[in-house]
Image (cartoon, rainbow, N blue to C red):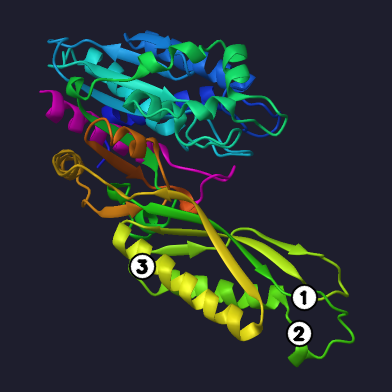
Amino acid sequence: MTNASALTLGRRVMGMIEDLAQHTDEPGRLTRLYLSKAHRKAAEATLALMQQAGLDAHIDALGSVVGRIEGGNPSAPALLIGSHIDSVVDAGRYDGNLGVVLGIVIAEALREQNIVPSCPIEIVAFGDEENVRFPTNLSTSYALAGHFNEAWLDGKDADGILVREALVQFGGDPHGIAALKRDPQRYRGYLEVHIEQGPQLEAGDLSVGIVSAINGITRARATVIGEAGHAGTVPMNMRRDALAAVAEMIGIVERAGSTRTDTVATVGVAQVQPGAINVIPARVDFTLDARSPDDAVRQAMVQDIVTECEAAAQRRGVSFTIEPFMESPATPMDKDLMLHLEDAVKSIGVSPLRLASGAGHDAVAIASLCPVAMLFVRCKGGISHNPAESITVEDADAAARVLLEAVKRIVA
């Protein structure tokens, strides 16, 4: 049951979300890419919110906004709370931003309740989680974990602008990245709240859920080469149709992802050559995205997909090659932090549900720095990366109360 004082937290969260949503690179829709003008404005707005909440805050060398409460013992290992403020193109307003503003709201609540945490609390608004503009991978959170890839600085966006150039224009400092590395001994854990981006909480009529693991991901590029020919003159049994072969392979991928527990497999891109209505396709390039919270299951699934696709290619007289370009291991959540979240969920009268995250998050990078845990918040229709992204003030309120209770338990 939501009471009036708790609902105040939810309203505060929603108000902050609305304030951040005005910062966009494209009028009429929310697009806030890393190191863009809108990102700078959103970072400055987030900085102001942190300072108003009593945090000692700054924008770091990579554009992340960092706020800190020293607590009763500034030398004790700190608790990190964070998420991201960058977005995809034509985004919703809750993805990432929700976790950032919840951290700030919790800092406000601790101050209003005259609670001095026993250790420092750091709140971080990362800037490069979506990795839409540049060919990077959680660069701002990996920097804190000490795993920033220097090659990312030479990555280019669609306009040919280098990351290092955009960073300087933003007001950042490529030479200051190494200093962002945190000492693992100085951090006790990381909490991240995020919209679910899926339908399970809504189906269970639950406001929040506890993430058990973040899926590992395999991504690969595949190519099938057949032979072009006239669509009207080559008999069906004499064709080496690359697209027909890929159609069978897409079915293989779909079956592989749907016949295992907690796995998904997707062909998201397919490019056909020569691409003429009256020509048999000679070549198709396509992608594979395979995910599972269990790395062994994911790897076995990918191997089965490759084996079956090779067999299909041989039957059809076409060639098949596949080249993996990304291997992201599964990230299990910390058991102790999960129990704190579970107890906090119970404290607001919600049955705790554990569920895997099919999407990646900054927690993947921070897991190499310290223990991590995540709380999911119900979103309407499971929709994300879309302007239709929506949560209720009641669910925002529930998430705030859970996070506040968990933080109290951790920093008591």
- The image shows residue 196 at horizontal and vertical percentages of 40, 47
- Quadrant housing the N terminus: top left
* Of residues 210 and 365, the one drawn nearer to the viewer in this rendering: 365
> Mark 2 touching mark 3, by CB under 8 A?
no
Q: Which residue is mark 3?
A: 300
Q: Judge the density around disc 2: few (<14), some (14-19), many (≥20) Cα neighbours within 10 Å.
A: many
Q: Is residue 404 magenta?
A: yes
| Nearest to N terminus: mark 2 or mark 3 | 2
User: What is the secondary structure assignment of the residue under circle 3?
Assistant: helix
The residue range painted magenta reads 383-412
In the image, is 94 to the left or to the right of 269?
left
- Find the distance from the CA under tag 2 to the CA under tag 3: 32 Å
Q: First in sequence, mark 2 or 1: give its number.
A: 1
- C-beta proximity under 8 Å, tags 2 and 1: yes
Residue 257, x across and y down, in percent: 44, 69
From the image, tell me which residue sits under label 1.
227
Cα distance in 3D space between marks 2 and 1: 8 Å
User: In the visual, does 368 lie left or right of 220?
Assistant: left
Q: Nearer the viewer, mark 3 or mark 1?
A: 1
Kind of residue at disc 1: Glu
The kind of secondary structure element at disc 1 is: loop
Point 78% across, 64% down: residue: 273
The span from disc 3 to disc 1 (Cα, nearest Å) is 31 Å
Q: Residues within 10 Å of mark 3 (few under 14, many from 20)?
A: few
**Residue 327: x, y in percent?**
42, 50
The answer to whether residue 100 of the structure is visible from this angle is no
Q: Position of residue 256 (x, y in %)?
A: 44, 72
Q: Mark 2 highlights which residue? A: 239
